[in-house]
Image: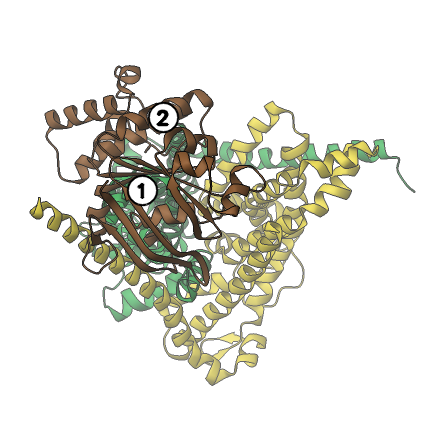
Chain colours: A brown, B green, C yellow
Amino acid sequence: MRKKMNTIDLDFYYGKNQALKGVNLGINENEITALIGPSGCGKSTFLRCLNRMNDIILQSRVEGRVLLDDVDIYQPGVDVVELRKKVGMVFQQPNPFPKSIYENVAYGPRRLGLHNRGSLDNIVEKSLRDAALWDEIKEDLGKSGLSISGGQQQRLCIARVLAVEPEVILMDEPCSALDPIATLKIEELMQDLKKNYTIVIVTHNMQQAARVSDWTGFFLLGELVEYGKTSELFSIPKDKRTEDYITGRFG
Amino acid sequence: MRLSPPVTQKMAWAACWAAAFFAIAALLTIIIYVFARGVGEIGWAFLSTDPIGGLSGQGGIRSAIVGTIYIVVLTLAMAAPLGIGAGIYLAEYAGDNWFTRIVRWVIETLAGVPSIVFGLFGFALFVIALNLSFCILAGALTLACLVLPTIIRTTEEAIKAVPQGHREGSLALGATKWQTIRHVVLPAAMPGIVTAIILAIGRSVEETACLYVTMGGSANMPITPLDNGRTLSLHLFYLAMNTNAMEKALATGVMLIIIIVIINAITRWLSSRWMIRMQGRV
Amino acid sequence: MIKIRNMRQFSDSAWKQVILVCGASSIVILLLIIIFTLREGLPAFTEIGFFKFISGTTWKVANDDYGILSFIVGSIYVTALALVMSVPLGVFCAIFLAEVAPNWMRQIVRPAVELLVGIPSVVYGLVGLLLLVPQISKLGGSGDSILAAAIVLTVMVLPTIISVSEDSIRSVPRVYKEGSLALGATQWQTIWHVMLPAARSGILAAVVLGMGRAIGETMAMIMVIGNSIKIPVSPLDPARTMTGSLALEINYATGLHWNALFACGVVLLIFILALNSIAMVLRGRTQQ
């Protein structure tokens, strides 16, 4: 299986605090990689390094390399904006813009310079269909993105990402603010999406990681303790700390 | 003598009601008095003739209305772009370090400095040093300095109140920083910024002290911003201090109160719309 | 695509420059105001002496003799008298709005207070001139007096004191109130012994803000205070405030007179700076 992204000895600092310590992790193309671990273990920080969202945090510092298709995304001259278009992100809290549903999805294409109404209509419809939201809201495209339910808002945010045709989608605990039914919908959606996209999901919910992912990485105190096939990691963990965590002895 | 708790409480309640009645009575006294004596003067002739000026209380308020409009428009044209830009700078680009902390402190302090101190500065710099002499432009420049700190602060606060999630969502879609500010942050902060502008309009209409020492106060119709002129507030002051035409002064007061009430109503309407929008009930 | 990308990057950095220029020029303008006032005022301090300037009782332009004690006394006298009246009124009104008032009454008082904020200061001055001054003249003197100015100021600063105090009373945690009521205290005892002490910093901040507004008021004061250069003794005496002197004299001042007026502006700045620092400390304490 081809590695879509790779990190090599990745360190990350918030001021003087080291949040990631020498992380080496390869992310397979068209598969789902889950990152688990207790709160504050660095899994979200790691995820945000993959599309340089951490750049907007003041006084933070990155060492090591992050490769996307074998190109280091932290090397000088890389266009961060272009990178984030390729590596999209869905956040913990659904964060639709206070605009209409249509405008939320059309936002990315518009910023990339697409203003043709017909093409935008097509992109909006396709993205909402791919995010399994079209049938529920096709009559209400003009309504505010904030007026729909939390689960629908999160799928709207996914549709918004799909509209810019990324290659990798990063999901930062996308279901933590949602109820079980909405969570299930998102999990089903992920299975559909992985045919065309590479997905990395951070979750604090081990059952979710076991259900949806092909590969799982376990983070503890900024280190990647163990990384392997999900089925193996959850049944025969190699590291004592992983075993303690997945059997619920801490965290 | 010690009063029993229930008695003390009754007295305290009475004091509370009395204080509230005083506030309402003060307002009603001012409004009723100003309207009762002033409203009779207002008519087409009053609105459409220029005052005579000097010690004469004759004439209407036409040139004062034009002066007020001039002042409001010029002040905003100068202070609004600069202040909004500076607010964006502080909220989105400047970060938090010793320098920006000092800058914020200076802005906060200047927002509380008496307007006559701005008047001193404006008179010395614009009227004397830049040789504009007394004119509407000098007044507007001074007033722009006066409202600038408020516009900067209100803009910065409105922008900071936009949830960080909106910015991250936009950046993660491959929008540039400016696109994010222009298309997500500013629309969400717009009602707050508009409120700042309206407050600045209100301030320009009621401000007197810093214009008294920079505008000149001529009663003649101003043609260009380089002409000497007066606003409604200044006109009221001149009438009250230099003439016996108190009815005309009160009529000018009526006009001022009506303008302020309209501005208050617009502000309140906008802020309620903002709440609705941010909660998604469009 | 390349072209659009370059356009996007270009506009991103171009707008960043525009914003930067706005920020920098605003900061420069604001610093300029302070520096300019200091620079013009400084000669008065060096020539007359700081202490002599603020403690001098005579202000005679013809003799080039400038002391601003009577203005300082005028400003402080008026402000103090106004606060003596407006603080109790404002705090009781705030208690009323936060704890006592029935809903219908609150819906009358709140908009009334908001409207009081908006009325231009010259209108306050005018009403004071026409309504108060004739009444006060019956007590003795011309009527143009500290008392008239203080009453006008009382009404002007009332809204500030009411709204800031009300906010701080409302932000007292419910548990304090419930704890006290549960011990059998009356509602008023609870307000007086528990809620007001807990809201103390916020109420003091309200008073300081009101003080700032009172010291800075100019036109309404000129209209009712008489503007005489003499240290006032009785509240019925006329007086002059620092702000009033600046407005009345700057337009025809030259030489040392000019510098003395700017120096008076500097003294005002110092007052405001002190009040702001106090308010900032108090606000910090409220947040804890």
Q: C160 or A47, which lies in front?
A: A47
How far is disc 1 from disc 2 in space, using C-alphas? 28 Å
Q: Measured from the top left, where is residue C255 in percent x and y?
A: 37, 79
Q: C75 or B103, which lies in front?
A: B103
Which chain is disc 2 placed on? A
Q: Measured from the top left, where is residue C186 in percent x and y?
A: 81, 33
Q: Quadrant of residue C179?
A: top right
Local packing at callout 1 (Cα closer than 10 Å; few below 14, some 14-19, many 20+) is: many
User: Disc 1 on helix, strand or loop?
Assistant: helix
Q: Name the residue under label 1.
A: B185
Amino acid at circle 2: Ile
Amino acid at circle 1: Val
Q: Measured from the top left, where is residue A36 in percent x and y?
A: 44, 41
**Residue at image point 44% right, 59% down:** A18
**Residue at image point 57% right, 67% down:** C72
Q: Residue furthest right?
A: B1
Local packing at callout 2 (Cα closer than 10 Å; few below 14, some 14-19, many 20+) is: many
Q: A170 or B151, which lies in front?
A: A170
User: Disc 2 on helix, strand or loop?
Assistant: helix
Q: Measured from the top left, where is residue C257 in percent x and y?
A: 42, 76
